[in-house]
Amino acid sequence: MAQKTSEKGLNGATAPVVTEPGRVRNVVLVGHSGSGKTTLVEALLAATGTIPRAGTVTDGTTVSDYDPAAVRQQRSVALACAPLIHQDVKINLLDTPGYADFVGELRAGLRAADAAVFVVSAEGGVDDATTALWEECAAVGMPRAVVITRLDHPRADYDGTLEACQEAFGENVMPTYQPMLADDGQSVAGLLGLVTLRVLDYSEGYPPKVGQAEPEHLAPIADDRNTLIEGIIAESEDETLMDRYLGGEEVTSDTLMADLEKAVAKGNFYPVIPVCSATGVGLDALLDGLVTAAPSPLEHDLPVVTGVDGAPRPPLTCDPEGPLVAEVVKTTIDRHVGRVSLVRVFSGTLRPEQVLHVSGHGLAERGHPDHDADERVAHIYSPLGATLREVPYCVAGDLCAITKSGSAETGDTLSSKDDPLLMAPWSMPEPLLPIAIVAKSRSDEDNLAKNLARLVAGDPTLRLDRNAETHQLVLWTMGESHADVVLDRLRSGGVELDTEPVKVPLRETFTSSAKGHGRHVKQSGGHGQYAVCDISVEPLPRGSGFEFVDKVVGGAVPHNYIPSVEKGVRSQLDRGLVAGYPVVDLRVTLFDGKAHSVDSSDAAFQTAGALALREAAAAAQVTLLEPIDEIAVRVPETFVGAVMSDLSGRRGRPLGSESEADGAHSVVRAEVPATELIRYAVELRALSSGAGTFTRTYVRHEPMPAHLADAVRKEHAK
């Protein structure tokens, strides 16, 4: 039995502490928005006495939804950790947002967990995004269970929802309990265990009365029970069990439950448990299942580690006495406490007053430069939502929180300063919705930069881009809801800011040859300015860049002023000629000019070079080039036609589509102007009912249609 102590923390709350990884279960709750994950967590916390009573989402009083944005929106927007004790086992419940914009929080929960509970509403059913997440968990072999909630909803359809789960999630998704209706024939008052034939009667509240099934209960469940038993036996490690069962041998419920629990822990079997959070129906069945069937950290493969230099290291084991290796799975900024890091300890034991090495590598493209630092951890806490309760240590396999770290970011590795190690960052989708941010005043700029740095440090799905071509500060987000939360957090941090339309980095180029005469002559008493130059301009093939050619003869332009002409031309190219965008792919040839022995200067010839280029542009044809991206859109087969039609409406050129191995999804590829993709992350989600995803890669710049180019020129001229 694990030794437990209780330590006082903030608000006088107590925290459970375990000494053995085998007494820990890390379980992430996933599912679409509104399925009842947060309400289920509240019910489980109240049922185990962790909190005195369950809060509600509508009142903003739940443990999980402590973020002010979550309270206002009445939905989860961030990962939350809520530990509880059941049967002397510590269960770390990880509540994740159900909305697709907050996939970063979801991925963090998956990284910290050893098992996933898919929460499905009996009223809402299964959506495509939940199905995609199931496939993602299957790819990494994560054990899963299904909880069907909201059984008390007027439109609840348990049987239909169970069928939808089996159709969406595949084989071995089987109910282990059958709901039992109350005398009114509508509300659920109990559960009947299909293996044990135990009856859990909740008609008088939670906890239930426990009894055995009556004979009249057996006939309606016979088919489901036989299917379940055969499914369990098929996954049994005892290869003779199926033959014995088919031969008529009675298999005991203890044997079946033991095999069921092993199959669940290995990720080969997926039990379905009906739960009604409001009445307590099924809460004890779920808790018992998490303790007995969910794998402990000892049964879960650990991430690969290397030295900070990339040198390979031996595989980790979940050993409290092993080398310290932990990972920051989430970073938040608390206005009172400062930076709070949620940490999963994979090996060793994390203790207060310990000096740690903080390593972050591999996320430079997301705005997280590689970093290494040594820091002392003063205190260790067990988080219960926003409440931090101090604990004396955190062993391998458990979760904890540390505060006031100066450098730790989400995805960073914590290890011993004497033997620093590094874990590869987990996979994160690319943020694809850009938001251009502007500080309202110069005094707000420093505050904006500081708060943005904090947010980006905590959220790997954000990317900050200071675009050198458009001179905009662009924050790339996962979608509108994500952007709203980020902007809300910035403003609540005291930053006065505005947003503006995102500019796409266009370019300008010549489509015909021309000549230009630049004359800069000024006499205003004293030392004057005198420079004359003649140039010819000709377009080059796309991607050639800029060439400057000197063909001056007879010293018409003194040799020492020729670089000045080139400098003036290059400066004008950077400023643009017709719409303020850089000019590319052309050759400028200086072939003649004049100088004055006294009044000519470097500055004068720079000005003359720029004037000559502007005159050439007025005589030639200058067009705008827009960036073209190749995109790959992954959607269910039913949306392929709609996606291809939509891309054509965005001036896209289809490159083809291919079906994936599952037969249910296709990837559509096309080349699309970047100007048509600014809000595509939002519009694809609406088009595909939230099931579509895409990636984009820059390919080249090519001429923009004349009517669109004219509109850009007119806007620039205002």
Image (tube, rainbow, N blue to C red):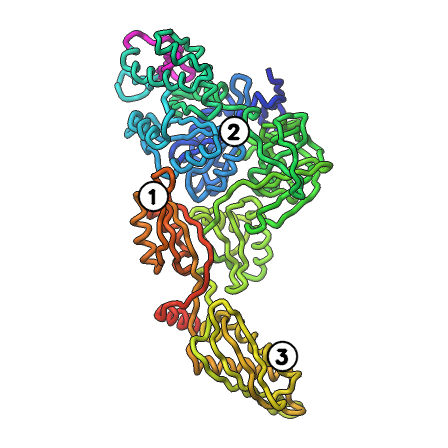
Rendered location of residue 66, percent (x, y)? 50, 37
> Given the image, on which type of amino acid does mark 3 rest?
Pro
Residue 13 versus residue 588 in the image, above or below: above
Residue 504 location (% of width, % of height): 45, 62
In whole angstroms, how far apart are the C-alphas of marks 3 and 1? 58 Å
> Within the image, what quadrant is residue 298 found in?
top right
Tell me residue 296's x, y (percent).
54, 24
Residue appearing at x 43%, y 78% in the figure:
512
Q: Quadrant of the C terminus?
A: bottom left
Q: Residue at x 60, y 18 (%)?
A: 2
Magenta span has 495?
no
Pointer 2 residue: 114
Q: Nearer the viewer, residue 234 or 91?
A: 234
Secondary structure under the numbered disc 3 in the rendered image: helix
Above/below status of 254 relative to 152:
above
Q: Are marks 2 and 1 in contact (CB under 8 Å)?
A: no
Q: Can you give x and y, in whole percent of width and height, for residue 273 in the image?
A: 39, 23
Residue 202 shown in magenta: yes
Magenta highlight range? 191-216
For marks 2 and 1 on the same chain, the one whose residue lies earlier in the sequence:
2
Q: Nearer the viewer, mark 3 or mark 1?
A: 3
The amino acid type of the residue labelled 1 equals: Ser
Q: Amino acid at mark 2?
A: Asp
Q: Which residue is mark 3?
A: 563
In the current view of this chain or complex, which residue is farthest to the left?
Answer: 185
Along the viewing direction, whichever of 230 and 223 lies nearer the viewer: 230
Q: Which residue is mark 1?
A: 689
Q: Nearer the viewer, mark 2 or mark 3?
A: 3
